[in-house]
Amino acid sequence: MSRKNGNKLINSKLECPFCANPRFIADRSRGKAKKISVLWPRWRLQEKFWSEKILKLNDDYGHLASVVAEQRGESLRIVLEGDDFKKHWRDFVVEVFGIESVGEIIYPRKFERVWDNPPQPFLFVESTYQGPNQAALTRQFFACRITHKHKLAELIVHWWPTHGRLFEMRGPLVTQEPNSDIEAFKTAFDFFQRETRGNPKISEQAIKKTIQKLGQRATQRAVAREIGVTEQGLDKWRSRRGMSSWEEVVNRYAF
């Protein structure tokens, strides 16, 4: 069984497109592309490795940063490199890959109108309102490739609700200087390191579960008391995540 998405047919089982196509990255990296603007959710940005160029907010859209993407049909590719990053990470090139669809998200639903959300920092969903009586334009980024300008190896990361996030290293380890290659990709894994500053009780998962448990009673004070942390600690956590108010936190994690 299948359903139409524009002129494309998507398998109703919604298997992972990356796993189903060994040439997934190659198919989205070649050929003529048009440039489009993609709004990157501000709370996805881990400030420790982004430059001010990327962290700058787009005033028209609140807490969202705008990045340039390449579009080839339904295929999408964002390239981040050089002065997109702070000095420590500027030798890395990060390519983020995804698919554009009209209307429904292509990810399998957990239950009615609820989807799993791809993990940060590079994987995300962006949905654009197209006007009254028109389906939303949705861009789903679920795979990325990280390379180093002076190394031959590459780190491939992709995510899908049915299998979670998967990592794969590809390429040779230079015989003469293997330690240099290894150290470079230890730094690449910094992109995925979980934030540990502040009280260890304050985590995205703990806040999400507590907000959903308390429902309409999920004030900042109530959540802090439930988790066993201070309101000031929650404020610092919220600020590091790029959210401007507690209301934004609740809206983000309530469902």
Image (tube, rainbow, N blue to C red):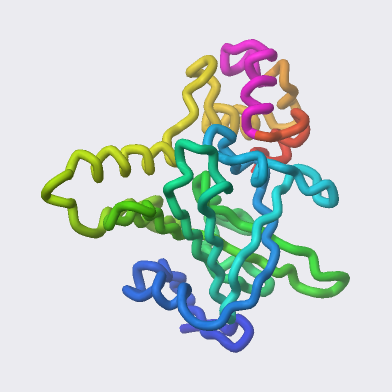
Give the quarter of the image for residue 160: bottom left
Left or right placement of residue 237 versus residue 134 in this view: left
Q: Residue furthest bottom?
A: 7
Q: Is residue 143 above or below residue 247?
A: below
How many numbered circles are shown? 0
Outermost left residue: 175
Q: Main secondary structure of the magenta part?
A: helix
What range of the chain is rendered magenta? 223-241
Nearest the viewer among 237 and 28 is 28
Name the residue nearer the viewer: 218 or 207: 207
The quadrant the C terminus occupies is top right
Task: Residue 230: say if magenta.
Answer: yes
In depth, the one of 76 and 55 nearer the eye is: 55
Residue pushed farthest right? 132
Tell me which residue sits at (63%, 84%) in the image.
6
Q: What's the residue at 69%, 14% (across, down)?
A: 231
Q: In the figure, 217 relative to 66: above or below?
A: above
Q: Is residue 181 above or below residue 35?
A: above
Q: Is residue 12 left or right of residue 138?
A: left
- Give residue 16's position: percent from left, percent from top: 41, 67
The answer to which image quadrant residue 169 occupies is: bottom left
**Is residue 55 located in the magenta-colored stretch of the structure?**
no
Residue 42 rendering spot, x and y as whole percentages: 67, 43
Residue beneath the point at 74% across and 23% down: 219
Q: Is residue 68 rendered to the left or right of residue 9? A: right
* Percent x, y of residue 86: 54, 38
Residue at horizontal 41 percent and vertical 70 percent from the top = 25
Figure quadrant of residue 109: bottom right
Residue 145 position (above or below residue 57):
below
Q: Position of residue 147 (x, y in %)?
A: 37, 55
